[in-house]
Amino acid sequence: MSALERIRAAAKARAGGVVVVPEWGDLAVHYRPVKLGDVEAALAISRGSQVRQNIELFVRIAQDADGKPLFDRIDAIELLELLDPHVIGRVLRQVGIISDDAAAIDEAEKN
């Protein structure tokens, strides 16, 4: 098996999950894994804002139970105005967009 075939297999094996958010009326947010292309697209849109980049990523990976997007991409702008920072911070950690790992945070701040 070639290196690329191994990477393809690993990508197919990655699973998303579901997070229930009580503050949003027990909304079940299903999500798929973040891909490098998602990060690149969110970075291009975010204009250097880490918060905007995180919300863009969330909008890209959040799905309903049938795998359909929960949000349109334009919804990221309104979400920035509506979201409670503590609630979305917890959700972003649960879906893997941000980390509680102090070493990872320190490294990200250096870059």
Image: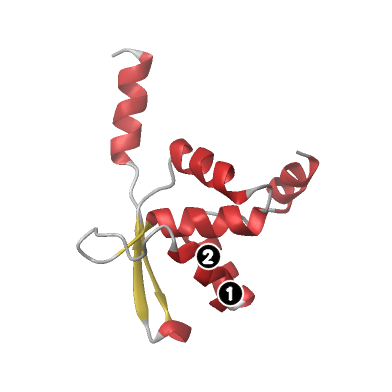
Q: Is residue 1 left or right of residue 79?
A: left
Q: Quadrant of the C terminus?
A: top right
Kindly state the secondary structure of the residue where label 2 is placed.
helix
Location of residue 99 (image quadrant): bottom right
Residue 33 appears in the picture as rendered? yes
Q: Amino acid at mark 1?
A: Glu
Indicate the position of residue 96 as horizontal and vertical percent values. Answer: 51, 55
Residues under labels 2 and 1: Cα distance? Answer: 7 Å
Residue located farthest toward the right when viewing the structure as drawn: 110
Q: Is residue 20 above or below residue 62?
A: below
Q: Residue furthest left?
A: 66
Q: Amino acid at mark 2?
A: Ile
- Badge 1 marks a residue whose secondary structure is helix
Count neighbours of disc 2 (C-alpha within 10 A) and say few if under 14, some if 14 to 19, many if 20 or more.
few
Judging by the rendered image, the residue that carries numbered circle 1 is 81
Picture layout, residue 59 above or below residue 4: below
Q: Mark 2 sits on what residue?
A: 77
Which residue is found at the position 30% from the left and 39% from the top? 13
Check whether the beta carbons of the residues at disc 2 and disc 1 lie within 8 A of each other: yes
User: Colour scheme used in the picture?
Assistant: secondary structure
* Residue pictured at 19% horizontal, 62% vertical: 66
